[in-house]
C-alpha cells in the first residue's frame, strides 16, 4: 500500500526556536495533504489543508503565521512551527490522499513535539 | 451537527469475542466514503476498511467488517475474534469530495 513518510518522529526544542516537520508521499502523487494536531486521548484536529502549488487553507483558530505550511510538490509538504512555545507541544500528524471520494487518507507516523 | 458521531468513548471485549464499534454520520452528499482507522499507542493511524456510499454489499477485510446501514446513516465496525493486539483507539471517518471528517474515537480494550 501507499506510504507516507513523516520526519522527525520526535523533536525537543527550546522555546522561541522554529521546527520543521516533513511529510512525503513515497509512491503516489498526493494532490491533497492534511495536517492534524492531536492531544492525548483526543481525536485528530485538522489544522490545514494543502494542495500542491497553492496556499494552504487553514482551519479557524489556527495561526497561519505560526504554522507555516508549504506544499511544494505532489510528494512533499512541510509544516514549520515558528517561534515555538510550550503550548505548541503536541502530536502532529500529516496525511495525504489523491482525488476521488474512494481514496483513503494515508497517514504519516506522526511527530511528537516537545517545547521546553 | 456533527458529521461523524462515535458514542462509545470506551469499550471492553473478551479475547476471541466479537465487538461492534458504533459510528453514525451526517451528510446530504450522495457520494461519500466511509473509513475506519486504528490508532495504537504508538500513534500511527492504520487504515482498516472502506465503504463507498454506492456499495451494495458490506465491506469486509479479514476480521474486520463494516455494517453499513445507509438509511440509518450508520457504519459500524465489527471486529471478530478479538485479539490482544486489537487494543487501540478506533476512529470512524467520512470523506466528502476533498474533505475528511473524523469522529472522537472509541478506545477498545481487549481483556485476556
Image (cartoon, rainbow, N blue to C red):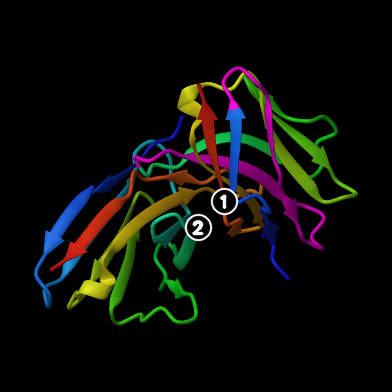
What separation in Å lies between label 1 and label 2 (alpha carbons)?
6 Å
- Do circles 1 and 2 both sit on a common chain? no
Give me the disc on residue A4. none
- How far across and down, in percent of the image, does residue A90 sit? 30, 62
Could you tell me which secondary element the residue under label 2 belongs to?
loop
Q: Nearer the viewer, residue B6 or B74?
A: B6
Could you tell me which secondary element the residue under label 1 belongs to?
loop
Q: Is residue A115 above or below residue A22?
A: below
Residue B41 covered by magenta stretch: yes
- How far across and down, in percent of the image, does residue A43 sit? 50, 57
Tell me what residue is drawn at x 42 percent, y 70 percent. Answer: A54
Q: Quadrant of residue A70?
A: bottom left
Q: Which residue is mark 2?
A: A43
Tell me the chain of label 2.
Answer: A
Q: Is residue A87 above or below residue A38?
A: below
Q: Quadrant of residue B96?
A: bottom right
Tell me the chain of label 1.
Answer: B
Q: Nearer the viewer, residue B84 or A6?
A: B84
Q: Is residue B107 left or right of residue A109?
A: right
Q: Nearer the viewer, residue A25 or B75?
A: B75
Answer few, some or many: residues within 10 Å of disc 1's Cα (few below 14, many 20 plus, some between 14 and 19): many
Whether residue B79 appears in this view of the structure is yes
Whether residue A102 appears in this view of the structure is no
Tell me what residue is drawn at x 61 percent, y 30 percent. Answer: B13
The segment highlighted magenta reads B14-42
Q: Quadrant of residue A64?
A: bottom left
Give the quadrant of the N terminus of chain B.
bottom right
- How far across and down, in percent of the image, does residue B68 sit? 80, 39
Tell me what residue is drawn at x 52 percent, y 21 percent. Answer: B83
Q: Are marks 1 and 2 in contact (CB under 8 Å)?
A: yes
Q: Is residue B105 left or right of residue A36?
A: right
Q: Which residue is mark 1?
A: B105
Amino acid at each position: 500500500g501507499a506510504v507516507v513518510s513523516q520526519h522527525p518522529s520526535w523533536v525537543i526544542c527550546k522555546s522561541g526556536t522554529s521546527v520543521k516537520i516533513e511529510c512525503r508521499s513515497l509512491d503516489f502523487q498526493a494532490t491533497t495533504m492534511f495536517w492534524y494536531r492531536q492531544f492525548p486521548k483526543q481525536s485528530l484536529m485538522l489544522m490545514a489543508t494543502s494542495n500542491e502549488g497553492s496556499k494552504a487553507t487553514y482551519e479557524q483558530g489556527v495561526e497561519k503565521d505560526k504554522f507555516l505550511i508549504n506544499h511544494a510538490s505532489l510528494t512533499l509538504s512541510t509544516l514549520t512551527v515558528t517561534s515555538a512555545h510550550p503550548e505548541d507541544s503536541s502530536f502532529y500528524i500529516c496525511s495525504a490522499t489523491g482525488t476521488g471520494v474512494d481514496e483513503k487518507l494515508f497517514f504519516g507516523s506522526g511527530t511528537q513535539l516537545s517545547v521546553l | 451537527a456533527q458529521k461523524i458521531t462515535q458514542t462509545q468513548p470506551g469499550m471492553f471485549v473478551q479475547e476471541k469475542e466479537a465487538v461492534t464499534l458504533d459510528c453514525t454520520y451526517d451528510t446530504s452528499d450522495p457520494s461519500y466514503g466511509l473509513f475506519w482507522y486504528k490508532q495504537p499507542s504508538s500513534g500511527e493511524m492504520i487504515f482498516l476498511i472502506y465503504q463507498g456510499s454506492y456499495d451494495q454489499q458490506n465491506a469486509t477485510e479479514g476480521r474486520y467488517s463494516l455494517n453499513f446501514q445507509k438509511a440509518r446513516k450508520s457504519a459500524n465496525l465489527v471486529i471478530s475474534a478479538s485479539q490482544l493486539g486489537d487494543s487501540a483507539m478506533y476512529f470512524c471517518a467520512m470523506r466528502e469530495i476533498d474533505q475528511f471528517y473524523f469522529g472522537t474515537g472509541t478506545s477498545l480494550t481487549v481483556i485476556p
